[in-house]
Every structure is written in C-alpha cells, then in structure tokens.
Amino acid sequence: MSTLWETQLSSQEVKAYKQFFHAAAKSQPNVVTGIEAVQFFAKSGLSNIVLSEIWETADEKNLGYLTQDTFAIALKLIACAQNNIKATEPLFSTVTPLPQIQGVQVTTGSIMTPNEKKKYQTIYKSQQPTANGIPAETAKALFSKSRLPNHQLTQIWDLADIRQNGYLDETEFIIAMYYIAKLMDKSITTLPTILPPDVYAAASNTSLMSPLLQSRAKKIDTIGTMAFSSTNPLTSWDVTAHEKAQYDTYFEKLDKQHKGIIGGSEAVEFFKNSKLPEQDLVKIWDLADIRKSGTLNPNEFAVAMHLIHARLMGSQLPHVLPSTLIPPPVLPVQSPISTGGFGSPTARSFSTPISRDFNSSTQRGFSLPTADQDLIGDFGNEQVIQETNAVNLLQNQITTTKKSTRDIESQKTQLQQSLKALEEKKQSLQTQVDALKSQQQSDHTQLRQLKESIESEQPEWDKVKLSVQSAEQELKTTTEQVENEKLDLKKNQAENEKLRRSVHNIQMESMRLTKTLDELHAEHERRQQAIAQKKAEEKARLAEEARIAEEARLAEEARLAEEAKRAEEVKREEEARLAEEARLAEEARLAEEARLAEEARLAEEARLAEEARLAEEARLAEEARL
C-alpha cells in the first residue's frame, strides 16, 4: 500500500528516496535515528543553519528520529535548498531535481535517452567544432534559436561550461542542449544551481562529483536539532534566509516588469532612502553588481541591501566583495568570455553612470517615499534604523543558535552596546561628511569634463552606428542567399530521387528479361529432347545421319550454353554497374547532376541494346529449332 508521499512524487523520486532512506537507516530498518540523519544530511553540502530548519520541519512531533514519510519531507526540502527553489503547498508537489548527497549513488534509470544524446552529438558535429570545442559566439547564435529568456540561457551556459574556457566540448554541449530541450518542452521549469552528477554522467558516460559536495566533508557527531546548530560551514552566505525573504519582497515591488533584474535608475532611487553618502552607495553598487551587467538580480540586490544595513550599523565597506557574501549560485567573477556571450560585457565599470544617477537625483531634489512607495521603511529615521538593525542582529543570532537560550538581559546589553557604538561613530561620520562635501565639488567638475568628453566622442559613435547598420544589411542579404541555396538544394534532391527511381526501373526490367531468357532456354531444352527421341527411332540407314545430327545438336547446345553463360555474366556486370551508378547518383553532389543524367541515358541505351540482343538470340534459337 502506497503512503501519501509515494503517491505525490514521481516514480523516479520515489525510487531514489527509498534508496536514500535505506542508505541512511543503518541501525534500524524502518527508522533513521538522529545520529544517522545528522551524518547523512551533512553530506548534502548545506549549512548547519539550513539543515537545522529542515530537521525541525520534518520532525514536527519532536520524535528524535525520522520515518520514511518524514525522511521524504526532509529530502524534498534539501532538494529545494540545493536548487534555490521555493517550496510550495503541498510540499511534494514542488518540482525539483533529486537531492545530491555526497557518496550516495542512486539508480533511477538514464535521464537522457540514447536517441537524445545521439541527436545532440549530431548537432554538435554540424557546428564544425574546433579542438577546444564550440566557441561562445557560435553557441550563443545556436542557443538563441530556442527563444528561451536570456537569463535562462546564461544559467545553462554556467552549468555546462565546466572547463570555464569560453568553449563547449561535446559533453558540455550535450549538457546545455539537454537543459534547453527540457525547458522548451516544459519538462522542467527551473534550473539547478549546481550541475547534478547524473546529468554529467548521462552526457559523458562518466561520473562527476559536484564541487559543492566535494568541498563538504564535515562530520557531525551530536544528535537531534542542536546537532545542526554549530558554526556555519565555509559555504554559508552572510545574507540570512530571513533577510533574503525580506529583500526579495522589496525586489519584486521594484521589478515591475518581472524581468528578474532591476536597472540603475530603480536601484538608485530606492537606495537613496538609506541616506547614506553618494560615494558609499556607488561603492555598494560596484560590490553588489557581481555580474558587472549594470543591473541587479535578486541575489545581487540582497547583497547590496546587506551592505547598506552593515554600513548603517557603522561597519566599513570592503574593497573587494568577501567570499561569504557571494551568493551560492554565483561563481567568482570570470573573464568576459566565460559568460558565454549571453550577458552584457563584464569589463566595463558602472561607477560613473551610477554616480550620474545619484547626482541627477540630488539636483532634482529628493523626497521620502510615501507609505506605499517606502519599500525599506527603516531608511527614513535614525532611531528606527538603529532599532531595525539591532533586531536584525538578534534575528541572525536566533537563526545561528537555533532555539538556544534567549536571555533578555543579554539582548538588552547588546542593544545598548550597538547604540553606544553608533554614538561614537556619529562624530567620525560628521567629519567624513565635511570631507565628502569638499569632494562633491571636485566630483561635479569631473562630471562636467566627462560630459564634454562624451560629446566629443559622439561623431565617432555615430560612425560606428552606421557601420553596424551596414553590417546588418549585409547579414540580411546573406541570409536571403542562404534561403535561395536551400531551395535549390531541395530541387536537386528531388531530381536525384527521380534518377534513383529510373535506375531502379532499369534493374527491374533487366530481371524480367533474364526470366524470359531462362524460359526460352527451358523450352529449347524440351524441344531438343523431343528431337532426340524422334531421331532414336530412325532406321539403321539413318544412323550415320542421326550421329551427324546429334553432333550438330550438341555443338549447338554448347554454343547456346556459352551464349547463355555470357549473357548471365553480362547481366550480372550490368546489374553491378547499374547498382554502382545508383549509389553514385544517391551520393553525388550538386555539381555531379549532369554526369548522373548522362549515365542514366547510357543505362537506357544499354537496356535497349540488351533487349535487341536478347530478341536476336531468341530469333536465332527459333530458327535453329525450325
């Protein structure tokens, strides 16, 4: 009898989850103990904070162990966390890849059929790959035909570009095509943040351990919920789950077109609510814009918000974004080519445009947003800022310790220390404000110079624009020529098929004539036997004449046999020649069409000649019989 979780999961997930359960349940067949769960889930590569939350959700009744039902809940939540997928209600209806557990291999059948893989290999070879594989620009042009959103194609490139050299070899190309096909036929709706080992294995016939799983080797020996409450692993993110959820709400309100990114104009107006100096906001933008695209995605927006709150608390901004602030799905900034050509160029700096946005906002005059517009809320009042950040610190402590003793007096002391630190920092900030006012005048001068420089470069930009338009026109002409060539190719292929059928008809006619010749031989043999029988009954006086006639008959039979043998050899040679001509006609290029037509004409003449020769032989045979 199937349980609830089995009926709501796919057959592949049910099979995999059962294998995971049996791998974890070592001491008892139907239960995973606290120690076993801790040791097993630690291999998922998730932080202890996340695992602690997953444990509490799964072990809702505080039993201290997991059954198959609650173990399945934990696995589904792990899969959601590993792939940055928001869990829905009911939980098991959330579509996710299988959870990745280091050192545990499950057999669920191949996720990629041989025909699919063969098709992707054919496409790869048709792109004429170099020794390194298919370059980024070629892949971009090919993948863009799928009409998938640009951000999904970028994610697919990041998953497939294992070597990170700007090229896709055959295995990497198959991985990319697999995800493109799955997104196009709606088999999947979200992409994993880490390449699953089973996808790599299906594409390359080998196995690949996820780098996240390889880096996770920490062993935990305590049991229960507190076992997951130790220090954060190296893979944790400074932005807590609570902060991320809050920042995502702000981001969704700013992203009015639901493109998954917000531009500098939206972000500038929003970040100025914090009342931070312009230079700090420019630096925060440069740190948060990890992809260097001039836009922010939800993770980059969360990093910016985290830095703004930290700056409001008095912390100094780092010169380089710490690794603990790099979102889990994002790798360190690579060279421009490693983006696969789907993102904007990564080499340029956006400090100047953002500074211009801040300056223009200042010149227009800025008013605090209304209640509906104020997405951050705590950026308008100094005391509220202090209290909000103190609460955020407490929430981080609560999340980190996970249900540890909440000492109210300790919280009060921490709040007082935070307020004291802000008061001490106030004097230092006032000094910085005075210095920044002086620097502002210098920045205005630099801005004016930059505007003049842009105006002087305008003619060159116009020239480049004309060149681009000319190149686009040439591309359009070339595309039309390609389409015409395709039409000619189809026409020639149809003519080629017609010639192939003509050769086939010639072969069939040759077979018919051969059968007729065999029948003539049989008739000739029968009549010769009748003549021999009559001659045997002749009188003795005709014995010599009969002997002479018999010798003549035998000679004639030998001649006819020799002619039949030669005819058979000629027929076989003709069939071989016609078969060879048919093969050549099928494989011939467009340039060989005239030669194939000539060969077909010669074949027709040969057939007519053969018919004439066979008719002549039949006539001679009839004359010999008479």
Image (cartoon, rainbow, N blue to C red):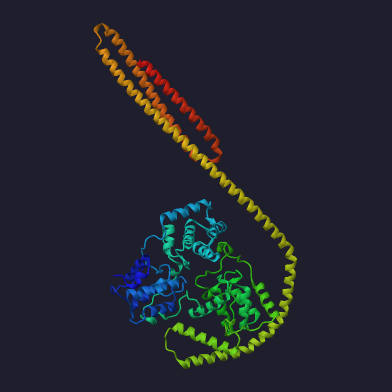
Q: Is residue 605 above or below residue 387?
A: above
Position of the C terminus, as image quadrant, is top left
Residue 52 lies left or right of residue 522; in this view the side is right
Q: Is residue 493 above or below residue 19?
A: above
Residue pictured at 59% horizontal, 82% vertical: 374
Closer to the camera in the image, 377 or 279: 377
Closer to the camera in the image, 127 or 584: 584
Residue 18 lies left or right of residue 85; in this view the side is left
Closer to the camera in the image, 361 or 525: 525
The x, y position of residue 437, in whole percent, is 70, 83
Residue pictured at 40% horizontal, 67% vertical: 98
Q: Is residue 422 above or below residue 113?
A: below
Closer to the camera in the image, 266 or 65: 266
Residue 212 visible here = yes
Marker count (numbered): 0
Query: Residue 351's image quarter?
Result: bottom right
The x, y position of residue 425, in whole percent, is 61, 88
